[in-house]
Structure formats: C-alpha cells, structure tokens
Image: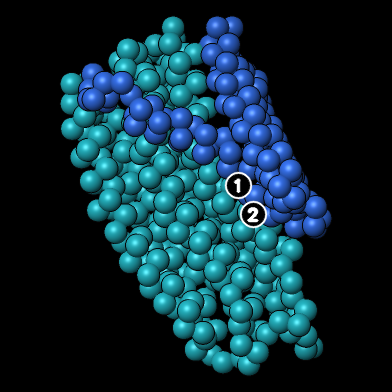
Amino acid sequence: MTFETYEWIRAAAFTGAGLSVGLSAIGAAIGEGYTAGKANQAVSYRPNLSGEILRTMLVGQAVAETAGIFGLVIAMMLLFSPAEGHSILTAWAYLGAGLAMGLSAIGSGVGSGLPAGSACEGIGRQPGMANKLNTLMLIGSGVSQSPAIFGFLIALLLLFKPLPDTMALIPAFSLLASGLCMGFGAIGPGIGDGIVAGNAVTGAARNPETLSILTRTMLVGQAVTESTAIYALVVALLLSLNT
Amino acid sequence: MDQFKEIRQTEKKYASIAISIAIFVGLALILLSFKALGKGLILGTLFSVFNFIIAGETLPMRLGITRNRAILISGGSILMRYVLLAIPLIMSIKMPQYNLATTVIGLFMIQGLILVEQMSRVIFSSTPKHLDY
C-alpha cells in the first residue's frame, strides 16, 4: 500500500498537533496543580486568608497556563495547515514544530507553577507582604515563560518556512533536529527559572527586608539559567535555516 | 463567601480592562481599514476573558466536595476551557474576516495584562526602592 505525499504531510501535521498540545498540557497541568497544592496547604493553616490565597492561586495558575495556550495555538495551526502541493520536507517541518512547542512548554509550565506555589505559601506566612510577593511571583513566572516563547518562535519558523521541492535526508533530519533541539533545550531552563523564582518568593516571605536584594539575585540567576535555552535557540535556528 | 468575593473582584478587574483595551484598539484598527486585525483581536480577547472567568467561577465548585467529584469538575473545567480557546483559533484559520496573529495576541490578553500591570507597578512606583519592605 502506497501513500500520496499530501497524506504523509497530513499525518505528520496531526502527529505534530498531538505532540504540541499533549506535551504542553503536561507542563501547564503540573505547574497549576503545584500552585493549587501549595494554596491548599496555606489555607489549611490560615483559613482567614483564604480569599487572598485563592486570588493569588488563580492569577498564578493563569500565568502557568500560558505554556498550554502556546501549545494549543501551534496545534490548531498544524491541524489546519496546507498539505496539497507541498514537498515531503513539509512533513518533517511539521513534526519538528510540534516537538519544539510541546517539549519547550513542559519546562515553562512547571517552572511558572513553582513561584506561584511559593507565593501562596508566603502569603500564609506574611499576609502584609501579599502585594509584593504577588509582584515578585509574577515577574519570576513571566521570565519562566521565555523558553516556551523560544519554542513558539521556532515552531512558527518551521511552519511557515519555504522549503525546497526535492526530498533529501539531511534537510529532513535538520528540520526534525531543530524541533528536538529547541524542545529539549528549553525544558531545563524553564524549570530552573521556576526554582530560582520560587525560592526568591519563599525567601522574601521569610525575611521581608531582603526583598530588594532577592529580586536582583533572582533576575541575575534567571538570566544565567536562561543561557542554555538561548544556546538551544541559536542551534535550532541554524538547523532550520540550513535547509 | 468572602474569599470568593475577592476572586470575583479580580475577575472583574482584569476582564473589564482586557475588554476595554481590545475594543479600543480593535475599533481603531477597524476604523483604519484593518478590519480583520481588529476583529481578530476582539475575538481572541473575548475568549481569553471567558477562559479566565470560567477558571475563577469553577473554583468554588471544586472546594468542599468529595475527591472524585472535585477531580471530575476540575477535569471537565480544563477540557471545556481548552475547547473554548480552540474556537477562536479555528474561526480565524477558517474565516478571512479574522486575522490569526491578532486572535493569538487576544488569547494572551489576560496573561499579558497581569504581567504588564505588575511590571508597571514596579517601574512607576513612587518610592525609589519600590520593592523594599
């Protein structure tokens, strides 16, 4: 049984869509679940602050969900992407796009949940610091989303890049490797950013006088943590532009 | 209950600002003859707001009930919100009246607003050491 080129492309687009939304949902769900878990813990010993803690939980979960929405956007684009009249290389690009987005969103989803969970816990400890802890949490969570944004950019590049008509093994694997490089390269930095931000929020709740120095240390730490995601972005760009 | 009042206030605050920005920018784009861009932004923002409101409104339903029921409601809420967010994307892909790029921007309106609000609080704070306790 033989298949037409457009059928292979369509099959790759569907597989890429499944990978994108499925993998990104893992990260977002773990991040949101961690936040909710810590919020429960905080409410259990500070029931009178449940309103403030639940509000922080809701906002933190909304930010952690961003990675899942990125995955959903790429999945929808893949599901409705054109197949007829395109070369078989398009199928490899679609698979790469799904992997780049899905894998990179895992780290960011988990990472964004860590400071949100710490903020819920911290508000239980220092109710007077609620606004400042929320700000620190949201800055930390926002930076944790950047590896997913890199993955989103590589996925868009793979989706819309004009490709040659002839099939060759090296360009095909370059497109797939571009997605794998960005996807795997973004998991660690996403979680690492979250660990930095989560501990900064915990530290600020423990010792409010150190908030200023903790914010600076957090941003420097996140910038360094992010560097490996930038290496992955550069290599993924080189791989995708090599076709 | 009091704690849900705070959640509702948060929903109201972000939803009203997001909708106002979308309508203002969307109308400006429509008046400048970029109809698809404006419509896409308004569409995406509307669904982003629905998603945020549903997340907040299902919170009370998930508390104080049996574990199995909580899992069922949480799972249903997530599934419903994912389907809800897919609707504007499918519409903008299938219908040329809506621009896909601005629809995607609209979908991130609530998250963007939360981050911008907090960042502006840090930047435009009146005291120089704004983050000091």
Chain A, colour shown: cyan
Circles 2 and 1: CB distance less than 8 Å? yes
Q: Mark 1 = which residue?
A: B105
On the image, the x and y values in percent for residue A231 come to: 33, 66
Subunit that carries the residue with mark 1: B
Q: Which of the two residues, B5 or B97, is positioned nearer the viewer here?
A: B97
The three-letter amino acid code for the residue at tag 1 is Ile
Q: Residue at x 44, y 47 (%)?
A: A145
Q: Which of the two residues, A123 or B121, is positioned nearer the viewer here?
A: B121
Q: Quadrant of residue A125?
A: top left
**Of all residues shown, which one is farthest toward the front?**
B32
Q: Mark 2 = which residue?
A: B101
The N terminus of chain B lies in quadrant? top right
On the image, the x and y values in percent for residue A241 come to: 48, 79
User: Would you call the spot at circle 1 few (<14 residues within 10 Å), some (14-19), or many (20 or more)?
Assistant: some
Q: Could you tell me which secondary element the residue under label 2 belongs to?
A: helix
- Tell how many labels: 2
On the image, the x and y values in percent for residue A205 come to: 27, 22
Q: Quadrant of residue A91?
A: bottom right
Question: Is any atom of residue B88 visible in this view?
Answer: no
Chain B, colour shown: blue
User: Would you call the spot at circle 2 few (<14 residues within 10 Å), some (14-19), or many (20 or more)?
Assistant: some
